[in-house]
Image (spheres, rainbow, N blue to C red):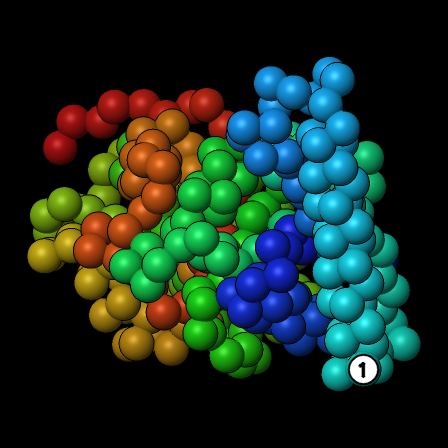
Amino acid sequence: MKNILVPTDFSISAYNAVKFALHLFEASPCVFYFLNTYTPELHSNRLMAGSVTGFSQNSMAAVSSEKGLKDVVRRVKKEFKNPLHSYETISSFSLLKDEVKETIVQHDIDFVIMGAIGSSDNETIYLGRNTVRILNAVNNCPVFAIPYNFEFTKLLNIAFVSDSNHFFNSDELDPILTLAKIFNSSVCMVTLQQEKGQLLELQKLNHELFERKLETVPHTFHQITIDASLSLSLEHFIDKAKCQLMVMSNSANSYMNNLCSNFVVERSKFSLRVPIVLIQGAENSVTVSQ
């Protein structure tokens, strides 16, 4: 039984992530936890201790949150009708990132799946404010970010992108192995390089670990030299290798960690057509000379 957490703000992007999650695990027994958080308006915070208005707005937000979650479950049951799936709702007066972290521990969550953008993000944004907050806050569970208009396709090939300055441990690769086994997928192990050349010693050690860890699933090794931009280089590889999902590490000093140091990730800086999964790397990044 898998436990899947799906945060939602009831936007089109959020429901697209819901559909992705349901399609992805359609053959697996799962409990889906649909989560919505709410907070009062900023101007009400000062009045919360004794203001009827503050409590009234809080009550209205709670009712709206609970109704929205019921509507999501009703729609899911109507559209999917999967006897392997059950659904729980969590409506919480709290910050999203805090509630996500608490829910992961409380319900032993295996994967978090959410839209790459939310209702307050415009089309120039690749990863929205809430998504970036979750990616930065969660360090014990893989997080999926689903592009706004992505349509689910079977996971035939999964790309796993590794940075040149991070030494992986075996546990970090567990989510990739799990996904590959569930969906009978091949794994493309991709090493990023700033310029063409032989693998660094650290990269060779990573390859040896990858080979041992993934011996039970089909896998191949690839090297990518970053040309104009990281996203363009990865898009080219995705097209060539026909990958439907990209897994990246959010370890210290990694490409994604640096990107997510901002409030949002703009499309002009990074953008992929396929969903990404971020796994939190152990704090073992090192500096390696070329």
Residue at position x 46%, y 74% from top? 150
| Dot 1: element | helix
User: In the rendered structure, which amino acid carries the disc numbered 1?
Assistant: Lys
- Closest to the observer, 36 or 188: 36
| Residue 208 in the figure: left or right of residue 110 | left
- Closest to the observer, 86 or 250: 86
Residue at position x 27%, y 51% from top? 266
Question: Residue 119: x and y, percent?
Answer: 49, 57
Residue at position x 45%, y 67% from top? 148
Q: Is residue 178 visible?
A: yes
Question: Residue 163: x and y, percent?
Answer: 31, 41
Q: Is residue 190 visible?
A: no
Check the image and report above or below for 20 versus 108: below
The residue where tag 1 is placed is 78
Residue farthest along the front direction in this orientation = 52
Check the image and report above or below for 164 versus 222: above
